[in-house]
Amino acid sequence: MPDHTTAPTRHTALVDQAVARLSPRWTTWTLQTIRQHGPMRLADIDSALPWVGAHAMAQIARRMQASGLLDRPQAGVYDLTPLGRDAHHVHRALAAWHRTHLAEFPEPLAEPERVQPERVEVALGRLRGKGTIPLLHALGQHGPLPRGALRNEAGLATGSSHYRITQLQDHQLITRTSPIADRGSEYTLTTAARRLTPVYAALAEFARKAHPATTPPDQHIATAQRTVRASAATSRSPAASSELFSHAAAPQPHVPAYVTALSRPSRTR
């Protein structure tokens, strides 16, 4: 049975959306704190996370409310939305992956089953950034690949791909097949990256639940619609929306040439 090491093609965009929604700094800590204590006032959240700062916490809460993770059941009180509660499944998958493959700090003996927000934030930080998921996906489907082929498969520009590939190496998610950086050198996934399958599944499922309310319309369709409306408005043709004009455009009467000639200003003084 083949090992699907990266998100399937149809899931890549969903995984990207989920990472973008959950990865901003302190999002995990805020979700875990409210999940543990229930609806909380902003001052109480700030007290529970004193290292964030009151002003920053207010901005974080507003951002998370706008992204559908938090709700305000009453003035000054924040609670998790159903989507915010569903994030816990993603957190568990990320924490388990980090604990097993990228253990950078020891597990506390008192609470071995507790989802550590620091693990989740570090894991999300490694998946964050434009091009990260496409690069990992390309290597999972077609790797090992040389840099140029990897860049093309991921659909990235030269500069951004160079930065992201270097970052993924630093994050221990991709590595060279040869220690020497020559023209024949190729990149491949590390063992940790190959074990991201459960994380991708959790992220894609989370994004699917948010998809109906948050996915923007197809940009090509929207652009085509705007073009048709603009063209119709310019020509005032029947294709134009009735809301654009208060009345239908009436055909202009034909003006004889001799009249227009008489209306021209004289060139003499």
Image (spheres, rainbow, N blue to C red):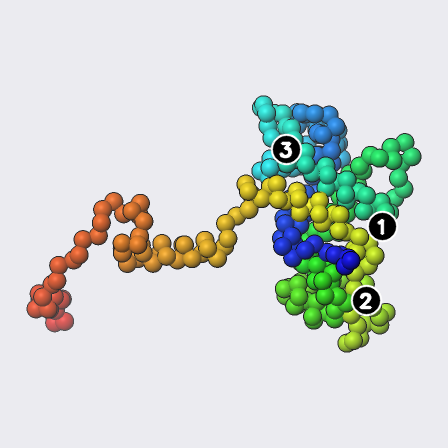
Residue projecting furthest to the top: 74
Distance Cα–Cα, label 2 vs label 3? 42 Å
Q: Secondary structure at mark 3?
A: helix
Distance Cα–Cα, label 2 vs label 1? 19 Å
Residue type marked 3: Pro
User: Mark 2 or 3 closer to N-term?
Assistant: 3
Check disc 3: other Cα within 10 Å, few if <14, some if 14-19, many if 20+: some
Residue at the spot x=80%, y=42% of the render? 95
Q: Is residue 243 above or below residue 12?
A: above
Q: Quadrant of residue 225?
A: bottom left
Marking on residue 134: none
Q: Quadrant of the N terminus?
A: bottom right
- Place of residue 220 in the rendered image (x, y in percent of width and height, measured from the top left): 48, 57
Distance Cα–Cα, label 1 vs label 3? 30 Å
- Place of residue 18 in the rendered image (x, y in percent of width and height, measured from the top left): 65, 46
- Place of residue 233 in the rendered image (x, y in percent of width and height, measured from the top left): 31, 54
Residue projecting furthest to the front: 1
Residue placed under numbered mark 3 in the picture: 82
- Place of residue 6 in the rendered image (x, y in percent of width and height, measured from the top left): 73, 56
Q: Is residue 47 above or below residue 1?
A: above
Residue at the spot x=72%, y=62% of the render? 141
Q: Secondary structure at mark 2?
A: strand
Check disc 1: other Cα within 10 Å, few if <14, some if 14-19, many if 20+: some
Marking on residue 176: 2
Task: Check whether the beta carbons of the residues at disc 2 and disc 3 lie within 8 A of each other.
Answer: no
Residue type marked 1: His
Q: Decide if residue 77 is on the left or right side of residue 46.
A: left
Q: Quadrant of residue 171?
A: bottom right
Residue placed under numbered mark 1 in the picture: 101
Q: Does the rendering let one see residue 157? A: yes
Q: Is residue 127 above or below residue 28?
A: below
